[in-house]
Every structure is written in C-alpha cells, then in structure tokens.
Amino acid sequence: MKITFLGTSHGITEKNAFCSSALVTAGDAQYLVDVGAPVDTLLANLDISLNDLRGIFITHPHQDHYVGLAQLTFTVEDFGRFDLASVPVLAPEGIDFASLNTFLWGDPRGHERYRVENPPKRRIRFQVYPDAAPEGSVIFDDGQLRVTAFPVRHIPHSHAFLLEAEGKRVVFTGDLLRDLSDYPRVATETPVDLVVTEAAHVRLDDPDTPMILGKSRTPALVISHRAPGRNPIEKVEALAAAIAPIKVIAAFDGMALEV
C-alpha cells in the first residue's frame, strides 16, 4: 500500500498548501481519503487518470474535507475522456449532495434558463454511510481495499477509518476533539502499520497528548492536517522525542509513503 498526501493543510489558505486529501494506492487501484484539495489537478500532475479511481471516503461533514468534490464531480461527469470512470463516494450524513448537483447542473425545477445540455452521467455515485457502530462498521470492500469506519466525536457524523490492503493496516483518525478523548481505540488496541492523525484542532504540546498518542500500536505516526500556527514543526519534533520509539512524521503536500 502506498499513501500520497495531496493536501495536508487545515483549511486556512497557506502558500503552496492544500486542504486535507490523501491518495491511497493498492495494487493498480487508486482511492481517496477526503477531498479538500483540487484532486483532479493534483492527480493529473501525478499522471493518474480519474478513470482509475475506485472509491472516495469522507471522514466527516466539514467543508475543508470535501470541497474538492465539486470540481472533481464536474470534471469526471463533463469530459468524455473519463467515460470509464465509476467512482463511489462514501460520505457520512450531513453533506447536501443534492445542492451540489443543483450548483453544477442547474435548477431541479427545470426552468429553461437553468437547463444544461449535458446532464451528469452518474460516473460519480454519492452514497451515505450510516454512523458506525462503536466496534466499527465496514463501509467498503471491493476485494482490493477494505474500509472500516469507527465513530469519533469531533462533530456529529465524524469517523476514523481503518484501511486494509495487501496485508497492511492503516488508520486515518480524521479530525478529533482537542483533548484527544476520542482518539480511536483501533489505533491503540490492535497493531497497525501506520496511523495518520490531525493537528488542526489538537495541541501537540498539551500534557496528555504524548501519553495518548504514545499508546498507539504502530511503528509510525504521521501528523497531517496541521495548523502551523497552533502546531509548528518544533512541536512535532518535541512530540517525536516524547513518544519514541514510535516514529513521528510531519506530512507535507506531495509526500509519499510506502507502507
């Protein structure tokens, strides 16, 4: 499994940075966790066709984690070179996809001035997954990648994901409460190969943060979705020293990791 961090910002405009999005490669298949970044452009820069996307998974209904869906949906639906695309978008409750379609394709009442010549072809398929059970709920399994959602309490309908492919297990925590009291137990109770967690809302220098993150049963912890004002790189380095031997990695846009 390979993870390429397309966007690692926390949503406030920064130079040379995009909002949260990660590309997961398993075999010859490509998947996305969150789409805060302009992923169609970033994938083109990596020579990855949108025809190769097999799934998109949204952690929670905050706009900086799904705003890129508007541009991605238009690109895939409106251009013939993506006629092989068939992409399920697994999203939690709280995202108004009907309004997104209206924004892109016109007034659903059918007024003449809103009519579009090329209505969407449904290459992008929006699916709402229900709030996960405490022990986890499988929301996707295509035989190549299995995604299990676990509830967290950042906002209603927030989830962490366990991704399993090629014998590897990776946890994306999504956004969490500031005190990390909802840090997903799947990261501390079962061995995983990598944890990707956020640093937009938590404070890495809070006294309890090293204690909580240090319980992770993983050789490596990636800090992504980082607010540099709240958690500058010096705090990431201090966390790394505090929870050794777990390796702590500060993600940056374009960073790729083989798991």
Image (spheres, grey):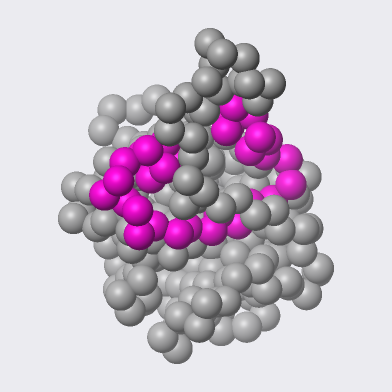
- Residue furthest top in the image: 113
* Image coordinates for residue 139, horizontal then vertical, percent: 66, 68
User: At 53% from the left edge and 72% from the top edge, which residue is drawn?
Assistant: 163
Quarter of the picture containing the N terminus is: bottom left
Q: Quadrant of residue 136?
A: bottom right
Residue 230 belongs to magenta span: no
Residue 81 belongs to magenta span: yes
User: At 81% from the left edge and 68% from the top edge, which residue is drawn?
Assistant: 133
- Residue furthest bottom in the image: 167
* Image coordinates for residue 36, horizontal then vertical, percent: 46, 40
Q: Is residue 48 left or right of residue 178?
A: left
User: At 62% from the left edge and 83% from the top edge, which residue is drawn?
Assistant: 190
* Image coordinates for residue 204, horizontal then vertical, percent: 53, 48
82 or 137: nearer the viewer: 82
9 or 40: nearer the viewer: 40
> Which residues lie in the magenta part?
73-102
Q: Is residue 72 left or right of residue 177?
A: left
Quarter of the picture containing the C terminus is: bottom left
User: At 77% from the left edge and 64% from the top edge, which residue is drawn?
Assistant: 132
